[in-house]
Image (cartoon, grey):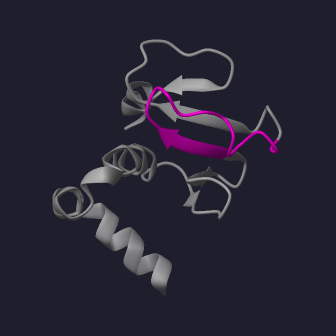
Amino acid sequence: MASKILVYLLNKISIMNKLFKKHRKKLAFFNQLKYQHSLTFPKMTDFMVDDTWFIEVGGKNKTGAQIKHLSKNKAFLALDNIEYGYMNHIPLWLFGFLY
């Protein structure tokens, strides 16, 4: 029940932007993937996509410390303020093309 309430609230992106200014990157990521993918919220990372990939969202200086214990093929950093990806770093803006 709580997860349904959370999804409903996250759908109201304009309200959420006002309430959670420091989580805008995570809200943007969630908003782009929610329509075609299953998203869950594991304790070790920000998101788990389709019960397969672990995604940690952050700025360009975020380290991979939170995902270093996970499989390199299944854990990624979605980073803001980077132009191109490398290794397991994916630019956050690329997820905008999934909508």
The residue furthest bottom is: 1
Q: Nearer the viewer, residue 22 or 55?
A: 22
Relative to 66, residue 17 above or below: below
Question: Which image quadrant for residue 25?
Answer: top left
- Left or right: 39 with respect to 81? right
- Left or right: 67 with respect to 77? right
Q: Is residue 63 magenta?
A: yes
Relative to 63, residue 17 above or below: below
State which quarter of the image contains the C terminus: top left
Position in image of residue 29 (x %, y %): 42, 44
Q: Which residues are magenta?
A: 54-70
Position in image of residue 42 (x %, y %): 64, 63
Q: Nearer the viewer, residue 51 or 23?
A: 23
Relative to 67, residue 16 above or below: below
Question: Which image quadrant for residue 4?
Answer: bottom left
Position in image of residue 3 (x %, y %): 49, 77
Mark count: 0
Query: At 64% from the left edge and 35% from the top edge, which residue is drawn?
Result: 76
Position in image of residue 1 (x %, y %): 48, 87
Instruction: Decide whether the magenta segment is chiefly helix, strand or loop.
Output: loop
Q: Is residue 2 magenta?
A: no
Query: At 47% from the left edge and 39% from the top edge, which residue is drawn?
Result: 58
Q: Nearer the viewer, residue 54 or 63?
A: 63
Relative to 50, residue 42 above or below: below
